[in-house]
Amino acid sequence: MKMVWHLAGLLLASGAMILSASPATMPSCTLQPLTENRDTKVLYTTSKVTSGCTSRGPEDLDVHVLYLNTSKLSILQLNLNVAAAARNRKTVFVLNSATYAFWKVNMEDHQLPLSFAVSNGHINATGAEINSIKPTSSSHDLLAWAKAEYGGVSSFAELETPESINFHVGKVLSSNEDCVPGRDFDAKQYLEASFASHNIRSCLPPGGHHEKEAHILWLKQPPPESGKQEVGVDIKVTCRAGTSATLPEMLLVLKSHDRLLWSFGQMPGTIKLAVSGKYSLKMFNSPELEGEQLPASEEGLIQAAHGKDFASIASFTEVPSAKSLTLELVQDCVGSTKQAVSKPPTEAPSLIKMIQNLVTECQPWRCLDNTMEIALPKDSLKHLQSLLQVSEVTLQDASCKTTDNSTHFVLKSLLESCSTAVEGGVLAKNKLVFSLAPLTEKVTVPFECTLPEKVFLQLYPTPDFSSTQTTVIRVNEAIYVQLSLRTANKEAEVEVEDCSLYTSHQASPQLLISSRKPQSYAVKFLTSPSPKIHRFSFVYKVAGEQWSVAPATLVCRLWVNSESQGPHEFESVLEVTLKNPNIPIRGQELKIGTVLGITFGAFLIGVLLTGALWYIYSHTRSTAKRPPVSADPPASESGSTNPSIGSTQSTPCSTSSMA
Ligand SMILES: *[C@@H]1O[C@H](CO)[C@@H](O)[C@H](O)[C@H]1NC(C)=O
Ligand SMILES: *[C@@H]1O[C@H](CO)[C@@H](O)[C@H](O)[C@H]1NC(C)=O
Ligand SMILES: *[C@@H]1O[C@H](CO)[C@@H](O)[C@H](O)[C@H]1NC(C)=O
């Protein structure tokens, strides 16, 4: 083992020797921010927070306040380690962030009586009590609120956009009376956060491909008062495509104070190092090795890389403080492209869950009588904008695309289309499918909505009620009537209160059913397949009337008792045509002129008849003491009904607090 690290040390040292032996003069360069670059990442963990404090807190409660000074949507993990002694202690986390945050809580011990007071964010914490609080835009206000609300706080920390936070719950943190935040607070007693640097810069000389690249990390934390400080370093290289990396020649420059020991873990085989202070190579179980003197300036560090013959500064990152550092590089690799890695950005699976939650909470769907409507406010997705771009929203059937009306994604579709499934006649089901660049996977949000309660009045020519419906009633022939209620309510009861046929040639309507009883021997109640369906048949009889075709209107009232609405009435109206087959339609021998006259006459008579019918209809309605219903004349063609009673499923989209 000793030999091995000797060898490694030798390699590194000799590399450095050769390099420093050829100091080249290179053009000075200006560092530019590396934006939109996912190929170089610098991750670090630290316990230093922007500001923080601890205190004794309230008597019987731990209160931890976390404020994120974020500038974009963040998704972060809160990992809780619970001290054995604190199992039964009540703990409250007060969480707030400047921009919307998704908190995922991981907790080994689900017994802890834990609650969260969250604002401007969404939290997933199984088994915990979750309360929404008013968002505040300052950490000072949040701390003041928490002190007033709980009578003190145990800890407070303000951080900038961490990716995850490890939190030790149940430690006695301080005996201070009050929690007064100090800047650059060291929260190492209880908290460690990991960050991805958003401040990576680079300086690449003109001219495309660079076979040699330097990465410079400057860790700017002050030296400890005594002893040395150890910082773990990992260098991870992954392939964008292909399998085996043929890396460019690489130099890693690490600069910090001289009492810092860099402890290298994972690293590629061929990297060159230029480090300040001391270092050790864990994989070789090496002792501490001497680093070199490096200047404490941006220009000086760049020159140091240039001096080692590395003209391209692929990344230059200043890190305020760290317990561990990870440099992640994504490279084009050669070899089989079978397992092409085009991984979406970090945490794709949970991000997808988050999107699903966001949309589900927003409920942009609505079921109407025979359509389904989508109206998704674009605002509701605004928290995703920094991460993802919505390129398309469709239903399950991808040809049913929503359109962007500048504020909403909207779509109207018939229930029979777009692969909408209607379960049990009342529950419409479909999926919203989102294409979100740069995710390669589509995000699917299944949804369902209940169709509004509605009465269907249908006529059938045969007693099996399965042939096609009709609106023609033939004189002296039985016609079969079905009244059915569409409702999600399983307990709903339905009775046919009364039914009448209003004709143009009779002054008063023909009562078919009144007070739930057949009113003529020609009406027969039939067995109904379910309590929500009523069936009967009747025969319309006339004697010696001289018409062959006449309009008529079938009006039925239904008494319904449903849980949601209580007892109430529905009225159903169906326009029908009476046919008297015994009177032949004469007219074959008529001339064109008379046909026109008759048509005109028929039209006039039709108008008059409709007027008379309407008069009769409205009068009988009022004398029969009907409940107040729409005063519109009977609707034609659709074969039904009064306005649907709305069990629409839409709620306004809340884009702020959700928990
Ligand atoms: C929050 O972050 C912004 C940008 O990084 C910074 O300008 C501002 O001072 C921070 N606010 C506080 C209270 O630290
Ligand atoms: C919430 O947490 C539970 C349990 O850990 C997990 O099954 C679920 O998928 C999480 N939901 C989201 C949206 O991450
Ligand atoms: C877009 O459609 C929604 C839902 O129909 C509507 O509320 C909104 O006013 C429309 N926006 C514009 C700009 O027309």
Image (cartoon, rainbow, N blue to C red):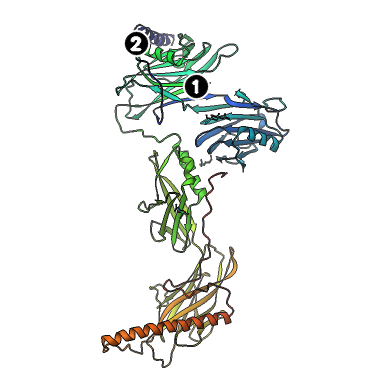
Q: Residue 494, relative to residue 272: is it above or below?
A: below
Q: Indicate the quadrant containing the C terminus: top left, top right, bottom left or bottom right.
A: top right
Question: Residue 646 or 143: which is nearer the viewer?
Answer: 143
Query: In x, y percent, where is residue 293?
Result: 46, 8
Q: Quadrant of residue 15?
A: top left
How many numbered circles are shown? 2
Q: Residue at x 62, y 39 (%)?
A: 117
Looking at the image, which residue is at 35% across and 30% down? 240
Q: Is residue 102 left or right of residue 12?
A: right
Q: Residues within 10 Å of mark 1 (few under 14, many from 20)?
A: many
Answer yes or no: do the residues labelled 1 and 2 have beta carbons within 8 Å?
no
- Determine whether 378 is above or below 148 in the image: below
Q: Residue 319 got which mark?
A: 1
Q: Tell me the tag on residue 604.
A: none
Residue that mark 2 sits on: 25
For the residue pair 536 and 313, the one nearer the viewer reads as: 313
Q: Is residue 189 visible?
A: yes
Q: Amino acid at mark 2?
A: Thr
Amino acid type for the residue under numbered disc 1: Val
Q: Earlier in the sequence, mark 1 or mark 2?
A: 2
Which quarter shows the N terminus?
top left
The reply to whether residue 169 is visible in this rendering is no
Pinpoint residue 595: horizontal percent, then vertical percent. 30, 85
In-image side of 652 versus 52 (left or right)? left
- Residue 224: x and y, percent? 58, 14
- What is the secondary structure assignment of the residue under circle 2? loop
Residue 655 horizontal/vertical position (percent)? 53, 45
Kind of element beneath mark 1: strand
Up/down of 199 relative to 301, above or below: below
Check mark 2 vs ligand 1: CB closer than 8 Å? yes or no.
no
